Amino acid sequence: MFTGIIQAMGTVLRLSRRGEDAVLEIGTDLDLSDVRIGDSMAVNGACLTVTAVGRRSFTADVSAETLSRTDLAFFSPGESANLEKALRPTDFLGGHIVLGHVDGLGRIQERTVKSGSVIFRIDVESGLSRYLVPKGSVAVDGVSLTVNRCEEHAFYVNMIPHTAGKTTLGFKKKGDRVNIETDILGKYVERLLHPEEKKEGGITRELLMKQGFFK
């Protein structure tokens, strides 16, 4: 589990294919002294398991599923990536609950700079749009951001200068791919209310109406 508050940027050292999977090595100035083999690390918002760790780099396996859903499949040596170590119980929850389970790719269609801030319009597939709401949370390449406005297949986010300077989003441009993870709360609500999945004792529209939540 993560917060979407990026701790450092790393540099891709290699992405080696192993059949349908891959091995990723990232170099970084992030303090890795408390990282152990088996720990989780978010790379551009994708939760990976550390398989080897050195003083200035770590290695992780990347599954075929992760490659199919994220921009990690397009990594090349020298490319930058956002990094965040797993959340500890004593840490501040400065962003929002991010699982590191990327839903899919978005594409930047507009990049506007206004008063130092960067405003992105990001297109997403229709399956993700229903989980995005104005003033809700979304993780873009692992960065926790607030949704400003929604359209049918797109949404807008505003990035302050600090975030732009500390993450890879600061140099993203029109046409670039980004990893998108929507808020987990919307997915659970949809699952509970899905008419094909109704079970006795579960949450249904009829139950909510009976309890006065809506008419």
Image: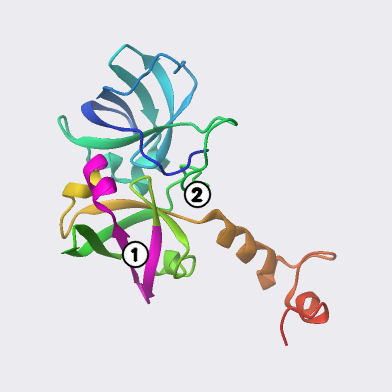
Residue located beneath label 1 in the image = 124
| Residue at x 73% of width, y 88% of height | 215
Q: Eyeballing the image, is 70 above or below 152? A: above
Camera-nearest residue between 176 and 90: 90
Mark 2 vs mark 1, foreground winner is: 2
Q: Which mark is residue 67?
A: none
Residue 56 sits in quarter: top left
Q: Secondary structure at mark 2?
A: loop
Residue located beneath label 2 in the image = 96
- The kind of residue tagged 2 is His
Q: Eyeballing the image, is 188 above or below 171? A: below
- Name the spot of residue 29 as percent of width and height, x first: 27, 22
| Residue at x 75% of width, y 72% of height | 204
Label 2, residues with CA under 10 Å away: few <14, some 14-19, many ≥20: some
Camera-nearest residue between 78 and 92: 92
- 137 left or right, relative to 208: left
Residue range corresponding to the magenta coloring? 146-167
